């Protein structure tokens, strides 16, 4: 009788150990797959952030293209043409840097000159829109990121 039990156990025990080992292996593989999916997801997020950063850099480069030094502009070799070109570049640079402040100053001047009680709600809204954009745009980008 004991021989029968030992014989049955010797036949069942290896199969039971095999099933137990197989279940452990499958759990391990699932854990590895989950970790790979997390790493892949993080990689996609990092790549998307890299693309956004590159777009911000290109946008900033386009904005500041007018501010490059005079030595980077093409020269003809004719002094008076190069002089006129330099004056145009300097004038355009001054114009580019003064547009937003000039608009803010003009609107603020109109507001002060006409006194706020003669303005309608729309006029005040326009003034606040211009001033808010002028003073808040760069601050908001720095505080909240460039998204």
Image (cartoon, rainbow, N blue to C red):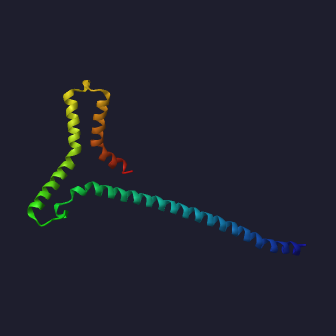
Measured from the top left, where is residue 84 in percent x and y? Answer: 12, 57
Q: Residue furthest right?
A: 1
Image label count: 0
Q: In the drawing, does residue 35 fall left or right of residue 23?
A: left
Q: In the drawing, does residue 104 fall left or right of residue 82?
A: right
Q: In the drawing, does residue 35 fall left or right of residue 99?
A: right
In what quadrant of the picture does the N terminus appear? bottom right
Q: Residue at x 53, y 60 (%)?
A: 38
Measured from the top left, where is residue 135 in percent x and y? Answer: 27, 42
Q: Residue at x 12, y 67 (%)?
A: 77
Q: Residue at x 62, y 64 (%)?
A: 30
In terms of depth relative to the viewer, which is nearer, 4 or 60?
A: 60
In terms of depth relative to the viewer, which is nearer, 135 or 72?
A: 72
Q: Residue at x 65, y 64 (%)?
A: 27
Measured from the top left, where is residue 70 in percent x and y? Answer: 16, 61
From the viewer's perspective, is residue 14 above or below residue 130?
below
In terms of depth relative to the viewer, which is nearer, 86 or 10?
A: 86
Q: Which corner quadrant of the image does residue 31 belong to?
A: bottom right
Measured from the top left, where is residue 45 in percent x and y? Answer: 46, 58
From the viewer's perspective, is residue 31 above or below residue 131?
below
Q: Residue furthest top?
A: 117
From the viewer's perspective, is residue 62 above or below residue 21?
above
In terms of depth relative to the viewer, which is nearer, 13 or 110?
A: 110
Q: Which corner quadrant of the image does residue 9 belong to?
A: bottom right
């Amino acid at each position: 009788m004991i021989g029968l039990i030992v014989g049955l156990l010797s036949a069942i025990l290896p199969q039971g150990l095999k099933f137990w080992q197989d279940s452990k292996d499958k759990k391990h593989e699932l854990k590895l797959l989950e970790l790979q999916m997390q790493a892949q997801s993080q990689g996609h997020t990092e790549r998307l952030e890299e693309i956004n950063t590159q777009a911000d850099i290109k946008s900033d480069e386009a904005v500041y293209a007018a501010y490059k030094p005079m030595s980077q502009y093409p020269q003809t070799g004719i002094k008076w043409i190069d002089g006129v070109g330099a004056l145009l570049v300097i004038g355009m640079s001054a114009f580019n840097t003064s547009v937003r402040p000039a608009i803010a100053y003009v609107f603020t001047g109109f507001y002060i000159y006409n006194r706020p009680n003669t303005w309608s709600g729309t006029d005040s809204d326009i003034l606040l829109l211009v001033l808010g954009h002028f003073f808040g745009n760069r601050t908001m980008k720095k505080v909240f990121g460039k998204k």
